[in-house]
Image (tube, grey):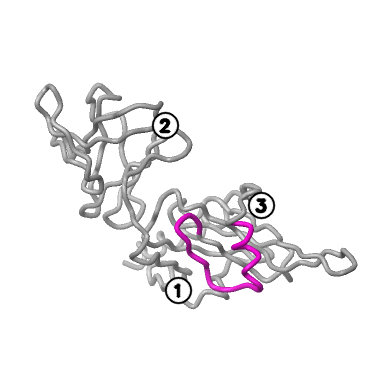
Amino acid sequence: MKKQKFLIISAVFLALCTSKISAAAPAEFQNYDLDLLLHEISKPCAPVITEDYIIFTADPKYRFAGIAFDFEDYQIIHPFQILTQKDDDEKKTRWHMFYCYERQHKLSSLKYRLVLDGLWTIDPNNPLKEYDENVNLYFSKVDVPDGIKIYTNSTQSNAVHFIYKGESGQKIRLGGNFTNWDPWIYELKETSPGLYELDLPLASGKYYYNYYIGLTPILDNTNPEKIYTNDGRSASVIVVD
């Protein structure tokens, strides 16, 4: 048991130490709603959750702030950006640092750690944290309110965000008329217990699909659109505009 615990701690420590710094996407200040939301945050605070974003903030006193997520195995450090404001003399001052996570995955919860001036830490602005006794570390946590839906949907980038909800620890694969019903090409990733996801670029059109456990087809339980195909199978339907 002690050896196993040591190996787990070593693996997490190695992941944190070898994380890659990835340049964050520029803030979409041309997006009026996002710009307004960022400026409504007057000081560092607990994560702000909306339908499209989770906004993390940090004190502007830090030279560098970054964030790493559990669904990326803490392998990527996303740098925060600096929100500034001008005084009457047009002099810019640092207001707060922020990172906007675009909720493409629609996770019901996520865990993360911050890097503040080179030191790994929990989020000092977030009271919600979780202790993992296997690695002897605290992780900051975000729970998404129930009012935010998690479902298979077509995105704005001509892709489909496939989601399956079921038991944890399964291998969930995807097949449809875009794979000639081959269920071995694509496999969904379990992003949180019982939640499986896959982003797949598809051209505009109507698509029929099923999830598969082994060779057993399963309808998408997050998508109410169903059909009987000409070859007699039940399938879920998604339309990409």
Residue drawn at the location 48% of the way across and 36% of the way down: 157
Q: Amino acid at mark 3?
A: Phe
Horizontal and vertical percent for residue 112? 49, 63
Which element is circle 3 on?
Answer: loop
For the residue carrying disc 2, how many other residues have a C-alpha within 10 Å: few (<14), some (14-19), or many (20+)? few
| Image quadrant in which the C terminus is located | top left
Image-quadrant location for residue 186: top left
The vertical placement of 163 against 202, above or below, is below
Which element is circle 2 on?
Answer: strand
The vertical placement of 7 against 130, above or below, is above
For the residue carrying disc 3, how many other residues have a C-alpha within 10 Å: few (<14), some (14-19), or many (20+)? few
> How far is mark 2 from mark 1, CA to CA?
35 Å
**Image mark for residue 29:** 3
**Residue bounds of the magenta highlight:** 34-53
Q: Which residue is mark 2?
A: 201
Which element is circle 1 on?
Answer: strand
> How far is mark 2 from mark 3, CA to CA?
26 Å
Horizontal and vertical percent for residue 158? 44, 33
Q: Is residue 15 left or right of residue 21?
A: left
For the residue carrying disc 1, how many other residues have a C-alpha within 10 Å: few (<14), some (14-19), or many (20+)? some
**Mark 1 against mark 3, which lies toward the viewer?**
3
Q: Earlier in the sequence, mark 1 or mark 3?
A: 3
Q: Amino acid at mark 1?
A: Lys
Q: Quick one: 138 or 163, which is closer to the camera? A: 163
Q: Earlier in the sequence, mark 2 or mark 3?
A: 3
* Residue 118 in magenta stretch: no
The vertical placement of 237 against 124, above or below, is above
**Mark 2 against mark 1, which lies toward the viewer?**
2
Pointer 2 with pointer 3, Cβ within 8 A:
no
Q: Amino acid at mark 2?
A: Pro
Q: Which residue is mark 1?
A: 129
**Mark 2 against mark 3, which lies toward the viewer?**
3
